[in-house]
Image (spheres, rainbow, N blue to C red):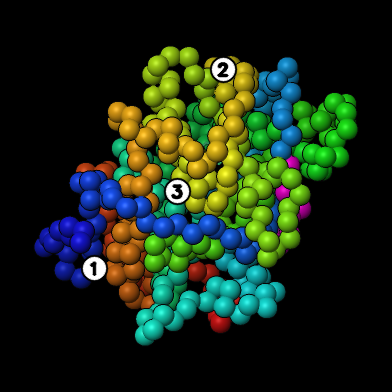
Amino acid sequence: DYPQKRTKADTQDLKQFSIHPLARFNGPCTTYKQPVEIMSFSYDNERNLHMDDRELKYYYPPDLKDCDLSHGYETFVQREQSGPEPIHSLLDSLAHAQKQSADKNLIQTDLVGYFVTILIISWRGIFTKILCTPYNRNEPWELGATLWNNTIFIEEHDTEYTKENSTGTTPRHKLMSYWGYKFENLCTISKLPSEITSSDDPELINRKTTIVNTNVQYCSVAKTSLGNNKLIMGAEVDCLCDAKPKRPANPVEKYIELKTSKVIEKEKDTFYFERYKLLKFWAQSFLIGVPKIIVGFRDNDGCIINVQEFKTMDIPKIVKGKNGMWNATVCLNFANKFLEWLKTVIVIDDPNSSYTISFQSPFKDIKVEFMGKKNSVLAERHLESLKN
Ligand code: A3P
Ligand code: MG
Ligand code: MG
C-alpha cells in the first residue's frame, strides 16, 4: 500500500521507496514494544571492549556555579575514529549474551506459522536516522545491510557527507563537540548518588577536572519490536538515576540521556529547538526506552545557564499541532512501513554479500541496491559465534 515507482533501472538490483506524501503515514500509531535490555557492555579509556558495566555512571546534578564546558579542552582525549562505528562490537556482545543465556532463542528468529520472522540488528543511531527521515531535509545517509540466518544486519557507510560533517572538521565544531562530552562528565559520578553525603565529596570535586576521554562508553543492547518488525539495537547510555536492577528486571527505566543545547532567547530559538533538537532527542531516547532526557542549556561561550528535564514520552505533545513541526506517529508509521518493505527487497541470504540503502533527500526515493559479494557487514568470526 505504499507507492512504489518502477523505473527502467529498477529491474532486479535497484528498489525504491518513496517518502512523500507523508499523509499516508498518519492514522493509528504502530505499536512499539517497551525495549528490554538483554546485554550491556563497556569500552574503557583505551577503547578496549569489556562485557561488563565498568563504565556505567550515575546522574548527579551539576554545579551551575562552576559549569564552563570549555574547561580542560586542551587535554581532551578524542577517540581515533575513521567513519561510522561498524556493527562488530554489538555482534560480539550478542554472541557473548547468547553463550551466557539459558534462553537459546535469545537472538534467534521465531517461526510464526509457516513464516520465519526476520530480525533486524543495528545500532540505535541508525534506527534514529530512519525514524527521523520523514522530517530530514539535508542530512543524507547511506547504510550497508547483509541478510544472514533470517537476520538483517545494518551498519552505516562512510560517505562524502559523513566525512565533511565528522567531529573536528573545524576548530569551532571540535570545541562544541567537546562541550557535549564535558557536560556528561560534569553531570555524572561513579558511585550511587545516595552515597554522596556532602558537597565536598571527592567524586564531586574530581569530576570537574577528570580528563574527558571519548573512548569511554557504557552501552545497552535491547530487544523490541515496531509493528511486526523485530529489532535488536545497541546504544550508548549516558547514565542511570539509581542502582541498576539485575536482569531479567529491565534497567532501561533507570536510564537518563544527557544533552546540551543553546540557551533559548528568541522565538526562532524555540522553533529551532523544538523542530530539530527535540525530534532527535525524542527519537534517540524513545527507541531504547530511555524515559528521561536532561538538557543543559549553554550560552555561546559554552557555560551552562540552566538544566531542564524532559520526559521522553511528553516530547511529542510539546510539538503537537504546531506549525512546521513533526509528528511522532508519522515517524513511527513511516519506519514501520519502511522496515516492512526492506524485508521484501533484502532477500539474498548470504553472509558475504551486501545491499546499499541510501537516502538523499525527502523528495527522492530511498534506494536499495544489491552489491553482490562485497562489503559484508559481518566479520568472519561472527559466522561461527552467532550461529544457533
Ligand atoms: P550533545 O548532544 O550534548 O551535543 P550523545 O548525546 O548522543 O550521548 O552524544 C554525546 C556528545 O557527543 C554530544 O553531546 C556531542 O558533543 C558529541 N557528538 C555526538 N555526535 C556528534 C557528531 N556527529 N558530531 C560532533 N559531536 C557529536
Ligand atoms: Mg552519550
Ligand atoms: Mg548524551
Name the outermost residue toward the left: 8
Tell me the crowding category of disc 2: few under 14, some 14 to 19, or many 20 or more residues within 10 angstroms, Cα based: some
Residue 69 horizontal side relative to residue 262, left or right: right
- Pick out the residue farthest to the front: 28
5 left or right of 200 in image: left
Precedes in sequence: disc 1 or disc 2? 1
Residue range (magenta): 49-58
Q: Earlier in the sequence, mark 1 or mark 3?
A: 1
Please say whether residue 198 is visible from this viewpoint: yes
Q: State the CA–CA distance, disc 1 to disc 2.
A: 50 Å
As measured in the structure, the alpha-carbon distance from the residue carrying label 2 to the one carrying label 3 is 27 Å
| 22 relative to 196, above or below | below
Toward which corner of the image does residue 258 lie, by quadrant? top right
Image quarter in which the N terminus is found: bottom left
**In the rendered image, the vertical position of residue 233 relative to residue 168, given as above or below:** below
Q: Which residue is mark 1?
A: 13
Q: Please, what secondary structure does the residue beneath circle 1 have? A: loop
